Image (cartoon, grey):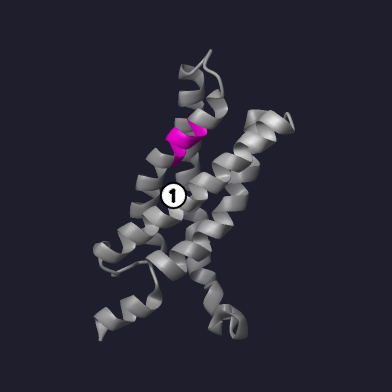
Amino acid sequence: MRYLRDPQRLVEKDEFKRFIMIGMLNTAIFYGFYEGLYFLSSGLEHRAALSWVLAYSMSSIIAHTTHRLITFHSSVPIEHSLPMAVGVYGSTLIMSTFSEVILIEVFAWHHRLAWIVNAVSFGAIIYIALRHLAFPTRLNAKETE
């Protein structure tokens, strides 16, 4: 609850700018995977959702590395950050896949529109979760003392 008293601690401006820049790169990689998989899965049922899951999973590995090294300049031990990042990415994968299916199958959205809405919506959630769970500054501070 300390974050509610001090909103600056919830999001750090420079770090969030780096997250946006690195996120754009990661999103381009994710989108490339998605489009390639969507093309290759022609004729399969639920191909958009399948492409989403596979592309999300592959790009999450790249995203963890880029966010660890560039976005958060993290010295948090990999033994902490990787399991937490897997939890964050796994949770958001489940939620975003559910959203993807609902938007495409129930509301009949075009798969690219659903992709954009999900990528943007879950990007904000991922930033906050990674910052406070996978790469917490309190662990960085402990290592430098």
| Kind of residue indicated by mark 1 | Gly
Considering depth in this image, is 135 or 49 the residue closer to the camera? Answer: 49
Question: What quarter of the picture does the C terminus occupy?
Answer: bottom left
> Camera-side residue: 25 or 55?
55
- The image shows residue 118 at horizontal and vertical percentages of 61, 44
Which corner quadrant holds the N terminus? bottom right
- Magenta extent: 51-56
Determine the residue located farthest toward the right in the rendered image: 107
Q: Residue at x 32, y 58 (%)?
A: 83
The residue located at (52%, 15%) in the rendering is 42
Q: Which residue matches tag 1?
A: 90
Q: Where is residue 141 in the image (x, y as percent from the top left)?
A: 32, 81
Query: Can you say whether 129 is above or below 119 in the image?
Result: below
Q: Is residue 112 magenta?
A: no
Please tell me whether residue 143 is drawn above or below residue 98 in the rendered image: below
Task: Specify whether residue 19 is in view.
Answer: yes
